[in-house]
Image: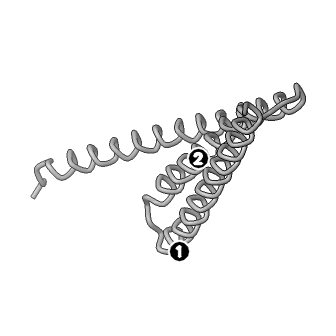
Amino acid sequence: MVHILEEILHHVISYGILLFEYIGVIVLIIDGIQGVIGYIKRDPEMRLNLAQGMATALSFKLGGEILRTVIVQTIQEIAVVACIIVLRASLTFLIHWEIKHMEQAKTLEESKAVEDSELPSGG
């Protein structure tokens, strides 16, 4: 009975990993295409949108790796999964840091534009 439950858990987790991995890939592809279109149109929001999409995709991929930790069986598999998790978490952190700084720069530009438009004209 325990063997059957372990087998069911293994299959459910394997499908969950695939689901998260595929969603991450799909998000990355769609966002990459939108990034190229934004680049061609010279959209000033393109970098921010691309970074947010990459962060979302990496979050799904990271979720898949975390699920993978449930089914690993050897110390070598644990080490590989741990390295992948650290790498993906680091990339996600760096992308979120960049998003934060891009949003701050955008807010600063917008507030400066509002201030400039409120200045009395010298005419």
Q: At 52% from the left edge and 73% from the top edge, which residue is drawn?
A: 37
Q: What element carries label 2?
A: helix
Instruction: Look at label 2 and name its amino acid.
Output: Phe
Q: Name the residue under label 1.
A: 40
Question: Callout 1, which amino acid?
Answer: Ile
Q: Which dot marks residue 83?
A: none
Q: Mark 2 packing: few (<14 Cα in 10 Å), some, or many (20+)?
A: many
Rendered view: 18 above or below 73: below
Secondary structure under tag 1 reads helix
Nearer to the camera, 108 or 65 = 65
**Which residue is at the front of the view, 32 or 82?**
82
Residue 15 relative to residue 113: left or right: right
Q: Which residue is drawn at 58% across and 46% down?
A: 60
- At x 50%, y 50%, the residue is 52
Query: Where's residue 9, x and y in %?
Result: 68, 39
Left or right of 72 on screen, residue 65: left
Q: Where is residue 112 in the image (x, y as percent from the top left)?
A: 28, 45
Q: List the residue tagged with mark 2.
A: 60
Quarter placement of the C terminus:
bottom left
